[in-house]
Image (spheres, grey):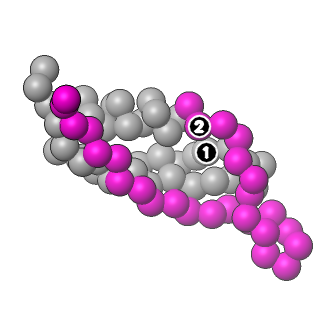
Amino acid sequence: MGVQGRVSVMFVIQKDGSIGNIRMRGQDKNLEKEAERIISKLPKMTPGKQRGRAVRVPFSIPINFRLQ
């Protein structure tokens, strides 16, 4: 399809380590769908801790799609 670009992905690591509340902003809807697919396949993570208790942690990362 010849589409390339950057997608900004925001998500939250929940108290149980799962990924939730995935939001994307990018140049093309197909790139956003692929970014969501990639993030949803992440394994369960270790949640953040504050005062010894598990807390939700927001993350924001850019994903660059480039044709080679």
* Residue 32 higher or lower than 30, as above or below: below
| Outermost residue, left side | 2
Rounded to the nearest whole Å, what is the CA distance between mark 1 and mark 2? 8 Å
> Could you tell me which residue is drawn at 70 percent across and 47 percent down?
45
Classify residue 64 as left or right of residue 42.
left
Residue beneath the point at 85% across and 69% down: 53
Q: Is residue 20 left or right of residue 64?
A: right
**Mark 1–mark 2 contact, CB under 8 Å?**
yes
Question: Quick one: label 1, few (<14), some, or many (20+) residues within 10 Å?
Answer: many
Q: Which residue is mark 1?
A: 19
Q: Is residue 48 above or below residue 63?
A: below
Quarter of the image containing the N terminus?
Answer: top left
Residue 29 visible in the picture: no
* Residue range (magenta): 41-68
Circle 2 sits on which residue?
42
Residue at x 71%, y 41% (from the top left corner): 44
What's the residue type where badge 1 is placed? Ile
